[in-house]
Amino acid sequence: MEKRVRNGITTIAAFCFLMPFVARAQERTLTLPPKQENKREEQIIVTQPKPGEEIDQAKARAALNTMYTALGGQKWLNRGDYVLRGRTSSFYKNEPTGVGEYVQFHHALPNNQWEDRIELTKKRDVVQIWTTTEGVEVTYRGRKPLPKEDQEAYFRRIHYSIDSIANTWLTDPQTLLVYGGHKVVARREVEEVTLIDKHNDSVTVDIELSNHYPLRRVFQFRNEKYSDFDEDVEEYSDWHDVDGIPTPYVTTRYFNGDMVAQRFVEEIHYKPVDPALFAPNAPLGKHKD
């Protein structure tokens, strides 16, 4: 269990990479369509099950295909940069402990990677910069690495994100798909799909039947201190069409069953972001978005 839920700045960092948006069994492998360099969507979205595939894998493929199509298919997969204004609330034992505002600059990189710049406080003079390898905090006093545990949590959630499921998990022929059937989650009927990769990591996605958007993403990881497993859950709600791309305006995170944070989008635009914002000498304080 997490000892404490950090207020303000740490809570904001826990969510910003998400925007807006999961027993080893290598004897059974997933057969994907032939890779075509010029058609990224076909590399990611599974269309029709191959003859002879097991029924549950075929149903899981179809459910994921429907989900990514509902999100916008190729347009969603290639949505790229965005600028977001929002706020987050932190919780401890399901009780609110703090609220923070932030501005996020999300910059897409080659090979399905990205970096984030999170500007905090009303003056926007406390900045977190997340590259593909580290997270640092920048103030007028200089730069310093963010706590190790925060960096581990950030990159862990990237590994299990809806984006990574599309771009990494489903492109690996050794990933196993398991169809969990229809269930009720948060009073909504969903289809449950679990993916297991070659490293025996697994992630479950609950897909809402009414709109085929992802309702919830669940994964577990080993707690090194207690040698048991912790559970990380994200729920997505209040979907809006933003520049033709379905976007959740509310993301709620649970840790071992307790609500720990909730993020609210106030404004978001998919548009190019200046790469200079991520440089070591990037400006602090308010500036043109």
Image (cartoon, grey):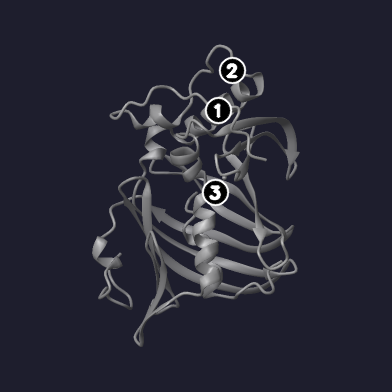
Query: Residue 59: x, y in percent?
Result: 62, 23
Q: Which residue is mark 2?
A: 53
Query: Residue 139: x, y in percent?
Result: 37, 82
Please name which of the two marks, 3 or 2, marks the residue nearer to the observer: 2
Is disc 1 surrounded by few (<14), some (14 to 19) or many (20+) residues within 10 Å?
Answer: some
Disc assigned to residue 160: 3
* Mark 3 or mark 2, earlier in chain: 2
Please name which of the two marks, 3 or 1, marks the residue nearer to the observer: 1
Q: Is residue 63 left or right of residue 71?
A: right
Disc assigned to residue 261: none
Q: Are marks 3 and 1 in contact (CB under 8 Å)?
A: no
Q: Which residue is mark 1?
A: 29
Type of amino acid under label 3: Tyr
Name the residue at 28% across, 73% down. 280
**SS of the residue at dot 1?**
loop
Residues at marks 3 and 1, CA–CA distance in whole angstroms: 20 Å
**SS of the residue at dot 3?**
loop
Name the residue at 66% across, 57% down. 222
Is disc 3 surrounded by few (<14), some (14 to 19) or many (20+) residues within 10 Å?
Answer: many
**SS of the residue at dot 2?**
loop
Q: Nearer the viewer, residue 287 or 26?
A: 26
Type of amino acid under label 1: Thr
Q: Nearer the viewer, residue 122 or 223?
A: 223
